[in-house]
């Protein structure tokens, strides 16, 4: 009889938790994107170390910025843009659960400022992204670093 009461108690607590969870949406993960595409013109505003949360913002070199233009059909796309000193281009694919894979990435090879040189996306690498409203975050280096972009157009 004691064993039956224990099981009943566990079931009751589980049901209460499940009801409470549905009521407050505490068990629902927020979406990683409000739109499953990278489409748009995006300006790089900083790099964030995911482990520490430290943000290294744009050094604001006059007249210089990093801008990527993504064009895709929600499955595959192209990248064009510029860093402080170079023009860049490439291609990528999008996967389930906000994943991306850079297929090819390259550009001109003029000496680059240290901050904008880090914006180059390595070919044949994968990562995750978040896109909410006017912000795009590309996670790279096995999720250790985040590139933070703001939407320009």
Image: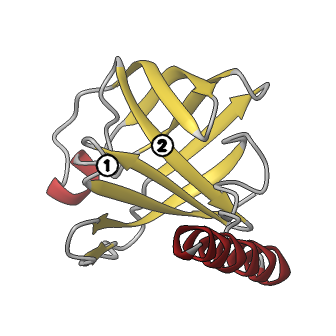
Secondary structure at numbered mark 2:
strand
Q: Give the residue at x 36% y 73%.
A: 62
As drawn, 17 above or below 39:
below
The reply to whether dot 1 and dot 2 touch (C-beta < 8 Å) is yes
Query: Which quarter of the rendering shows the C terminus?
Result: bottom right
Q: Give the residue at x 76% y 29%.
A: 74
Q: Which residue is mark 1?
A: 143
Q: CA distance from mark 1 to mark 2?
A: 8 Å
- The image quadrant of residue 55 is bottom left
Query: Which quarter of the rendering shows the N terminus?
Result: bottom right
Q: Which residue is mark 2?
A: 128
Query: Residue 57 placed where, x, y %?
Result: 32, 75
Tell me if mark 2 has few (under 14), some (14-19) or many (20+) residues whose alpha carbon lies within 10 angstroms of its own: many
Q: Give the residue at x 42% y 67%.
A: 63
- The image quadrant of residue 21 is bottom right
In the rendered structure, the answer to whether residue 120 lies left or right of residue 153 reads left
In the rendered structure, the answer to whether residue 6 lies left or right of residue 121 reads right
- The image quadrant of residue 22 is bottom right
């Amino acid at each position: 009889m004691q064993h039956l009461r224990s099981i009943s108690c566990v079931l009751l607590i589980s049901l209460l938790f499940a009801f409470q969870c549905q009521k407050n949406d505490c068990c629902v993960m927020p979406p990683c994107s409000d739109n499953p595409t990278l489409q748009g013109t995006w300006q790089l505003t900083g790099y964030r170390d995911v482990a520490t949360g430290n943000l290294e913002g744009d050094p604001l070199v006059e007249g210089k910025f990093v801008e990527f233009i993504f064009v895709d059909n929600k499955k595959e796309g192209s990248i064009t843009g510029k860093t402080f000193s170079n023009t860049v281009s490439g291609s990528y694919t999008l996967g389930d659960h906000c994943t991306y894979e850079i297929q090819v990435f390259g550009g001109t090879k003029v000496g680059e400022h240290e901050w904008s040189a880090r914006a180059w996306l390595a070919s044949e690498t994968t990562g995750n992204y978040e896109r909410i409203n006017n912000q795009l975050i590309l996670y790279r280096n096995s999720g250790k670093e985040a590139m933070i972009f703001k939407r320009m157009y």
